[in-house]
């Protein structure tokens, strides 16, 4: 009687199927997780700022409305008082937190200046501006 040789290979086909399903799920959900206000950023030639955690973004749209974007909740327009209160809570938790300010290119300068003044008034130590690089304009991006 001949003995059968044992096969010690792992069947990886089920693992590949699971991996492909997960890949499809991530490809579908990733674009949905990005929230923000559509603003037409001014173009500048400036160095980019890199941050380790998710940035806090204060946006000013072309109508002068203020928005606070932390990425996890829906974005609704805020008045300056509500914006100041929400940012104050964030700054109390982390005084060295970088707050990014983006203003639509068509926004009134006074609205962007009000947002910056409000951020400085509540004790934000690090404020950065978000702009669109000039190369992106030349290449159509």
Image: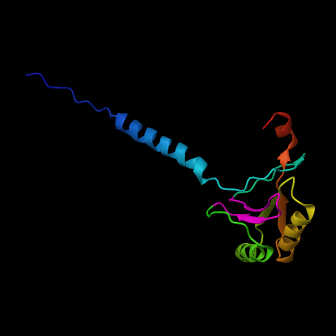
Residue at point 59%, 53% (across, down): 33
Name the one closer to the observer, 63 or 24: 63
The answer to whether 70 appears left or right of 125 in the picture is left
Percent position (x, y) of residue 140?
A: 80, 35
Residue at point 76%, 67% (across, down): 97
Task: State the residue lying farthest toward the top.
Answer: 2
Residue at point 61%, 62% (across, down): 72
Which quadrant is home to the C terminus?
top right
Percent position (x, y) of residue 83?
A: 76, 72
Query: Can residue 127 be seen?
Result: yes
Query: Can residue 12 be seen?
Result: no
Which quadrant is home to the N terminus?
top left
Count of marks, rendered view:
0
Q: Is residue 86 placed above or below 56 in the rendered structure?
A: below
Q: Which range is magenta?
A: 53-71
Percent position (x, y) of residue 10?
A: 33, 35
Name the one closer to the observer, 70 or 107: 107
Q: Is residue 64 magenta?
A: yes
- The coloring applied to the image is rainbow
Percent position (x, y) of residue 67?
A: 74, 65
Place residue 121 in its image quadrant. Answer: bottom right
Q: Is residue 22 magenta?
A: no
Task: State the residue lying farthest toward the left.
Answer: 1
């Amino acid at each position: 009687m001949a003995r059968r040789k044992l096969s010690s290979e792992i069947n990886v086909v089920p693992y590949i199927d699971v991996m492909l399903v997960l890949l499809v799920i991530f490809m579908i959900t990733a674009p949905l997780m990005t929230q923000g206000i559509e603003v037409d950023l001014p173009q500048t030639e400036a160095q980019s700022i890199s941050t380790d955690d998710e940035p806090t973004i204060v946006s000013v749209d072309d109508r002068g409305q203020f928005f606070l974007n932390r990425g996890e909740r829906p974005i609704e327009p805020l008045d300056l008082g509500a914006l100041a209160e929400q940012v104050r809570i964030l700054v109390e938790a982390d005084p060295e937190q970088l707050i990014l300010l983006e203003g639509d290119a068509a926004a009134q300068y006074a609205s962007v200046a009000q947002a910056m003044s409000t951020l400085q008034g509540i004790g934000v130590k690090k404020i950065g501006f978000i702009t669109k690089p000039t190369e992106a304009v030349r290449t159509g991006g």
